[in-house]
Structures are given as C-alpha cells and as structure tokens.
Image (cartoon, rainbow, N blue to C red):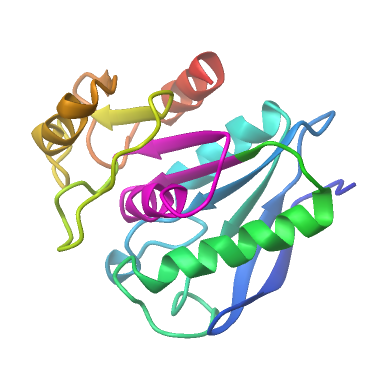
Amino acid sequence: MLKAMQKIDIAGPVGALETIVIPAAGEQTGIAVVCHPNPTQGGTNTNKVIQTAAKALSQLGYTCYLPNLRGVGSSGGNHDHGIGEVDDVIAVVDYARQQHGALPLALAGFSFGGFVAARTRARIDADKLLLMGPAVGKYEIPTPEVPADTLVIHGEADEVVPLENVMVWARPQHLPVIVLPEAGHFFHGRLVQLAGLIKRCW
C-alpha cells in the first residue's frame, strides 16, 4: 500500500507516461485516473484543479493516478487532440488494476481532461465519472453521452467553455449540472468549494 505521493512511469501505447500517484487516505476503496487540461495551453498533471480533485477523491478512499498524457512533460508521443489520449488513459487504468485488483474505478478530468475522460468512459466500464469544466463543443469530435450518475461541475462565468455549451450537451441526456455561481474556468478562489462538492456529491 502506498504511503505517500509518488512519481512513476507507466508504459503507454506510444511511450512512457509520467504519472503522479496520490494514495488513498485511510482504507483504499477504489482507484481513479484523473486527466489534466489542454497541454497546448499549459495543462499538466500538476494543474491545481485536478490536484484538488485527486486529493478529495483520496479522502474518499481512492488511490489516484494523474498521468501526463502523450507529449506532455516527459511522456512519450505527441499531443493527439483527445484521440490517442484515450488509449493512454486505458493503459493507466490497466496498470492501476494490476496493482490494486478489481476495485471500483473512477474516471475524472478537467476541461480537455473531462473530454478525454468522457471519451474513455465510452470505451471501457467505470463505476464513477467526474467532469469539471468539461471542454464540450471545443473539438471536432463531439463529447459522448455519459452515465446518468456522472458528476458534472461547471463555472457559471466560464470564459473558456461557455456554460451554455455544457447545458446544450446535458439537456437531451437529462443530466444534472452543478453550477458554481460566478466561478470561472479555472475555479480561481473556489477550489475549496470544489473539493467540498466532490466529497459531498460523490
């Protein structure tokens, strides 16, 4: 059982994936893979939003894996606009399952990472899905439908992904969206609230 945060390399389909592992606080009840925002705009696995989410999930008993997806940091390959990144996430899931067995799996992501997490969930089974400021309507490939119990959190004043984009996507699915009043895309000044929402609504 991991005792402290570690940095490891996980074999991916186009090279090693530089990954932060945050262990479960207390008894481990699940594993989570948490995906970073758009690397073309500086998104990496040290992003404050995904670090906040991972620490909240850790407190809920999840051992969290935060990979730098292809072409980010020292990870191999080149950025693939959310296509090949799905294969990267699946490789991390496979590794985590080898380490921890058949524990419940959560997929999570912020912005571009939310887009990747949703696309990954369309490919593999997962028990829970968390999308924060998901980049709906920002890529040629549409964001797929997601399970009814997906936790979606979005800022009312998101200046990167307009709230209306998310509502247009969520509406035909009858999918609830938690809206943080006046919050921007990066949840500046609202990270404590974000963590609290994750822990309360999970």
Q: Give the quarter of the image for residue 104.
A: top right
| Range of residues picked out in magenta | 106-133
Question: Who's the residue at 27% across and 65% down the image?
Answer: 41
Residue furthest top as drawn: 200
Q: Quadrant of residue 24?
A: top right
Of residues 143 and 122, the one nearer the viewer is 122
Q: Height in image: 88 above or below 53?
A: below
Q: Residue at x 11, y 33 (%)?
A: 168
Q: Residue at x 21, y 19 (%)?
A: 181
> Is residue 116 part of the magenta span, yes or no?
yes
- 114 left or right, relative to 158: right
Residue 65: give x, y in percent of width and height.
64, 53
Q: Is residue 190 visible?
A: no
Labels in figure, total = 0
- Foreground residue among 140 and 35: 140
Residue displayed at 16% across by 27% down? 172
Judge whether 50 appears above or below 192 on screen: below
Q: Is residue 46 left or right of residue 146?
A: right
Q: Quadrant of the rendered structure where residue 11 is?
A: bottom right
Residue 142 showing in the rendered view: yes
Q: Residue furthest right?
A: 1
Q: For the C terminus, which image quadrant?
A: top right
The answer to whether residue 79 is magenta is no
Residue 150, given in percent of the width and then of the height, sits at 41, 29
Q: Residue 147's spot in the image, x, y percent?
A: 40, 31
Q: Is residue 160 left or right of residue 192?
A: left
